[in-house]
């Protein structure tokens, strides 16, 4: 939520609507939005450091380190910086995938690795769920970019058509609508396949990857 509050700021994407409601800097003011985002980020690490999260200090440290990596310059913030500079240079599909894996996918990767970290499971499980999250994150971003092209502000709960107006490269602009849909479907199938060793226990995660393909908000 912190990342969305800051992403909507005038110095970033300058959005007035999020989830069908005025963004924080519109509903309140810019200073409040900045401070609210800072507070939410800090609370996240406060939660991870709490003994209520896990009795093992080592596990809590692993969680905090992974989140810091995912949210920092090698993850979400680094991806956001590339995104802000995207209009200054042409991006190919590989550049877009790297940007989206950093800006969006890194936090999904953390979420999916947090389970095996909390369970003190082996690296095999962390690596498998990280691979799932990498594909899942791209599916999420492609479908989000499709909403920007095909969706409505009413259903999406935010402004649409901004990527095209700003000339931003996305996999939709590179592959076209049909090509992007095919890529998203391929990634969803691959993500689901990665979870096969878990059988029925991973059914929700498998279904979630396919659910993204038809979302309209």
Image (cartoon, rainbow, N blue to C red):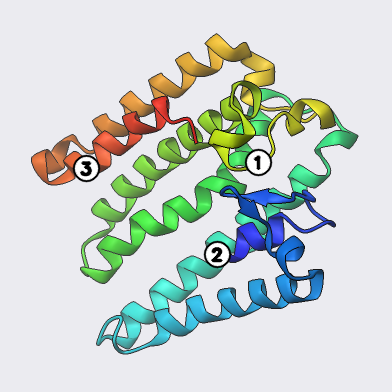
Residue 42 is situated, as x and y percent measured from the top left of the image, at 57, 80
Residue 162 is situated, as x and y percent measured from the top left of the image, at 75, 33
Residue 28, quarter of picture: bottom right
Residue marked by disc 1: 99
Q: Earlier in the sequence, mark 1 or mark 2?
A: 2
Of helix, strand and loop, which one carries label 1?
Answer: helix
Mark in front: 3 vs 2? 3
Residue closer to the observer: 160 or 74 = 160
Of helix, strand and loop, which one carries label 3?
Answer: helix
Residue ranking furthest to the right: 88
Residue 15 is situated, as x and y percent measured from the top left of the image, at 75, 49
Gap between marks 3 and 2 measured at Cα: 26 Å
Which residue is rendered at x = 86% and y = 35% of the image?
87
Residue marked by disc 3: 204
Q: Is residue 74 visible?
A: no
Left or right for 47, reference 35:
left
């Amino acid at each position: 939520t912190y990342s969305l509050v800051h992403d909507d700021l005038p110095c970033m994407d300058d959005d007035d609507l999020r989830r069908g409601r005025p963004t924080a800097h519109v509903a309140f003011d810019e200073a409040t939005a900045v401070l609210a985002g800072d507070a939410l980020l800090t609370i996240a690490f406060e939660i991870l450091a709490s003994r209520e999260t896990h009795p093992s200090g080592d596990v809590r440290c692993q969680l905090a380190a992974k989140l810091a990596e995912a949210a920092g310059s090698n993850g979400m913030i680094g991806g956001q910086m590339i995104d802000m500079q995207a209009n200054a240079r042409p991006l190919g599909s590989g550049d877009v995938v790297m940007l989206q894996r950093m800006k969006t996918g890194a936090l999904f990767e953390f979420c999916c690795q947090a389970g095996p970290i909390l369970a003190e499971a082996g690296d095999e499980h962390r690596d498998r769920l990280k691979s799932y999250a990498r594909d899942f994150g791209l599916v999420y971003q492609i479908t989000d970019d499709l909403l920007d092209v095909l969706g409505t502000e009413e259903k999406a709960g935010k402004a649409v058509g901004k990527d095209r107006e700003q000339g931003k490269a996305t996999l939709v602009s590179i592959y076209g609508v049909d090509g992007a849909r095919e890529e998203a479907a391929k990634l969803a199938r691959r993500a689901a396949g990665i979870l096969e060793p878990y059988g029925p226990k991973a059914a929700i995660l498998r279904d979630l990857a396919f659910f993204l393909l038809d979302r309209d908000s």
